[in-house]
């Protein structure tokens, strides 16, 4: 692409076809009157969603609903995708100048965005940790959907980023007994640092008042149903793309009157929707990242320029990465 030397040039990550990504340059014009210019410091890979994008596994029925706020292109390919960018405002009118902000923007070195679409970070939340804002927003919305109460016995199946954050939030409710359940025994150290218990599926507590499923695996969903007590809620937070999911809804599912409920961050939870805007929810999520223990969810950052080489390995199921930050400077 021929670039006008009078404008700035940004580099952005594009998912080009199944299993192939590349960095593309694009011109960035001067920001409009209602826009700010942001230079990216960090972004984060949402492994669950972006692995589906990378593999071309977004179902055609979900092409529109799965569009990220500032995504470019159309599913399945090519698309500029991502929704967890943290940067510094280098051009703005008024109070935003020089501020560190979060935006639901793809992986890109420099971008213009409406001033109303950035969230100024709390001063006690460092930029690298702030890449968890979108994940925390999803977890917060899920906790609202699940409605845990004091002294509840709670199991969270799946110690990925969202599951771990849900367990962390539930563990802060007085008297709760929260267990993070995962097939990977190495997640025990993470659970301990987040202040909750850890068990592998075979030894996880039964008769739970609430079970949250976030493993992205049909086997995990079956485990979640097994851990629920009579008339308990199983909250499904996993999204499987175009993968068929089967589970056992015979046996005790009906006799125990279990409730299988979905949760998705695209709408504010019904319990809070009359009073909460998306902006208020996002700000609350960022404020919840003040705890340094949440740095345990972050892998060592990888350089933006190395994404074409390193990202396929990060997105591989065997990688074991939780949240992968990308460093731009």
Image: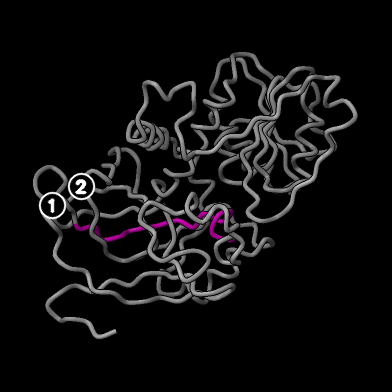
Give the percent coordinates (x, y) of residue 323. 52, 53
The residue shown at (26%, 62%) is 111
Q: Please say if 17 is above or below 224.
A: below
Q: Main structural element of the magenta stretch: helix, strand or loop? A: strand
39 is within the stretch colored magenta: yes
35 is within the stretch colored magenta: no
For the residues labelled 1 and 2, say whether their Cβ atoms are less than 8 Å apart: yes
The residue shown at (42%, 43%) is 133
Q: Quadrant of the N terminus?
A: bottom left
Q: Please say if 62 is above or below 11.
A: above
The residue shown at (15%, 74%) is 7
The residue shown at (44%, 44%) is 134
Give the percent coordinates (x, y) of residue 283. 34, 35
Label 2: element kind: helix
- Residue 92's tag is 1
The residue stretch that appears in magenta: 37-51
Give the percent coordinates (x, y) of residue 206. 81, 25
**Residue bearing the label numbered 2:** 115
Instruction: Say whether disc 1 or disc 2 marks the residue closer to the N-terminus.
Output: 1
Q: Nearer the viewer, residue 252 or 106?
A: 252
Give the left or right position of residue 35, taking residue 94 as reference.
Answer: right
């Amino acid at each position: 692409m021929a670039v006008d030397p009078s404008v700035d040039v940004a580099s952005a990550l594009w998912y080009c076809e199944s299993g192939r990504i590349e960095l593309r340059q694009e011109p960035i014009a001067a920001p409009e009157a209602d826009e700010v210019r942001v230079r990216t410091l960090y972004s984060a890979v949402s492994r669950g969603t972006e692995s589906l994008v990378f593999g071309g596994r977004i179902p055609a029925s979900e092409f529109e609903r799965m569009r990220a706020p500032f995504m470019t292109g159309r599913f399945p390919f090519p698309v500029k995708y991502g929704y967890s960018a943290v940067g510094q405002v280098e051009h703005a009118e008024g109070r935003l100048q020089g501020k560190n902000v979060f935006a639901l923007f793809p992986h890109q070195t420099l971008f213009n965005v409406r001033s109303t679409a950035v969230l100024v970070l709390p001063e006690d939340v460092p930029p690298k940790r702030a890449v968890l804002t979108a994940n925390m927003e999803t977890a917060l919305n899920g906790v609202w959907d699940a409605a845990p109460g004091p002294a509840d016995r709670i199991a969270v199946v799946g110690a990925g980023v969202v599951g771990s954050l849900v367990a962390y939030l539930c563990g802060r409710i007085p008297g709760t007994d929260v267990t993070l359940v995962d097939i990977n025994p190495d997640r025990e150290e993470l659970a301990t640092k987040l202040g909750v218990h850890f068990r592998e599926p075979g030894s996880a507590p039964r008769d739970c008042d609430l079970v949250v499923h976030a493993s992205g695996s049909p086997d995990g969903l079956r485990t979640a149903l097994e851990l629920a007590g009579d008339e308990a809620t199983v909250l499904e937070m996993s999204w499987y793309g175009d993968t068929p999911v089967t589970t056992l809804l015979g046996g005790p599912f009906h006799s125990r009157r279990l409730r299988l409920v979905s949760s998705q961050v695209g709408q504010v939870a019904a319990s809070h929707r009359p009073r909460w805007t998306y902006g208020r929810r996002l700000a609350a999520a960022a404020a919840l990242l003040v705890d340094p223990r949440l740095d345990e969810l972050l892998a060592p950052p990888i350089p933006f320029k190395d994404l074409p080489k390193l990202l396929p390995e990060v997105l591989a199921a065997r990688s074991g990465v939780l949240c992968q930050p990308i460093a731009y400077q």
